[in-house]
Image: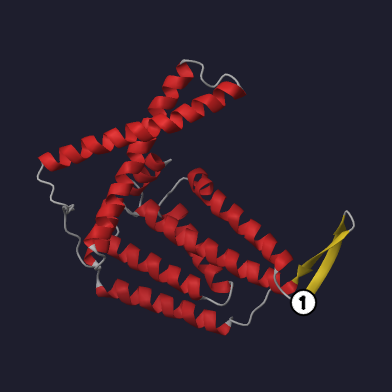
Amino acid sequence: MQNIIDNIAHYNKLRMVNPKLKVIFAISSLLVCVFSKSIVVPIIVALIMIYLTLFRAGVPKSIYLKLMFAPIGFGLITLVLMAFMFGYVKLFSFEIFGFKIPIYKDGIDLGLLVFSRMLGGVACMLFLALTTPMTELFYVLRELGVPSSVLDIAMMMYRYIFVLLEEMIRVENAQKTRLGYRNLKTTFKSLGMLASNLFIRTWERGEQLFITMSSRCYNGDLKVFGKIENPKSIYIVGIILFEIFLVIISYLTMNFKPF
C-alpha cells in the first residue's frame, strides 16, 4: 500500500501544481477543521478535499476508500461511545438483559463534532499525501522553517518504512514456500519467527545504509535537491479568502446542533 501511495503521489493529475500551494491549502483547511465549533465546516472541507482528490487528481476510488476505512471506523466507534457516556439530556434509552442504556443528546452532538473534525482532517491529509511526493513535501517544510533535525528523522523513518516492508515480504514469501501458514499452529509460529527475524534484518539493513551514506560524505544533514518556485500571489489570496469564508461559516453555525 505504501508503494501504491508513493506512485499515486508521483503520477496524479495535480502532480504539477505548486507543492507549496497544496501544503498551505491543506494545512490551513485542517486547522480550520480542528478549531471549528460546528460540524458544518469540517463536512464542507471533507467534501471539497474528497472531490479534489478523486475527481481532480484522479486517485482510484478503491484505494481512497481503503485508506478512509480505518479512520471512519474509529470515528464511528468514538461517536457511539460518546452517545452512551457523555451528556446530561437523555434522548432515549433501551434495555438489554435488564440494564437500561441511555443515549444522550449532548453525547451525540459531541460525537458528531469529533467525527466531522476527524473526517475533514483525514481528507486534508490524504489530499496532501496522494498529490504531493514526500521529497517535495520535505523540501517545502524545510523552507517553512521546520528544524532540519526533525525533517531528517522524518525522512529516515519514511525510508525505513519501505525497508521494513521489503524485508517483511521477503521473509513471508520464504515462509509460505515452506508451508509456514498451513494451519493455525504453524501460522502463530511463523508470525513469531517473522517478527524476530524482521527486527534483526532491518537492523542489519540500517547498518548497511548508514555505511553507504557515510561513504558518500554524510555529515548528519540530508540534502534535498531541487528548487520550488513560490506560488503566484493570486492563488495565495484565493486560499486566504476561502479560509476566511470557512471561518465565517464556522462562526455563523457555531450554535447549530443536529439533535
> How many numbered marks, from 0 up?
1
Identify the residue shown where x is 67% and y is 65%.
Answer: 82
Residue bearing mark 1: 89
* In the image, residue 92 above or below residue 237: above
Tell me where residue 205 sits by quadrant: top left
Tell me where residue 214 sits by quadrant: top left
> In what quadrant of the picture does the C terminus appear?
bottom right
Residue 18 visible at all: no
> Is 46 positioned to the left or the right of 211 in the image?
right
**Residue 84 on image: x %, y %:** 73, 64
Residue density around tag 1, few if under 14, some if 14–19, many if 20 or more, within 10 Å: few
* In the image, residue 39 above or below residue 216: below
- Colour theme: secondary structure
Q: Nearer the viewer, residue 241 or 9?
A: 9
Identify the residue shown where x is 56% and y is 21%.
Answer: 186
Residue 244 visible at all: yes
Amino acid at pointer 1: Val
**Residue 28 on image: x %, y %:** 39, 71
Q: Nearer the viewer, residue 77 or 1?
A: 77
Tell me where residue 228 sits by quadrant: bottom left
**Residue 116 on image: x %, y %:** 57, 66
Q: Nearer the viewer, residue 172 or 193?
A: 193
> Is 80 positioned to the left or the right of 186 in the image?
right
Considering the numbered disc 1 on the image, is that residue within a helix, a strand or a loop?
Answer: loop
Identify the residue shown where x is 36% and y is 53%.
Answer: 131
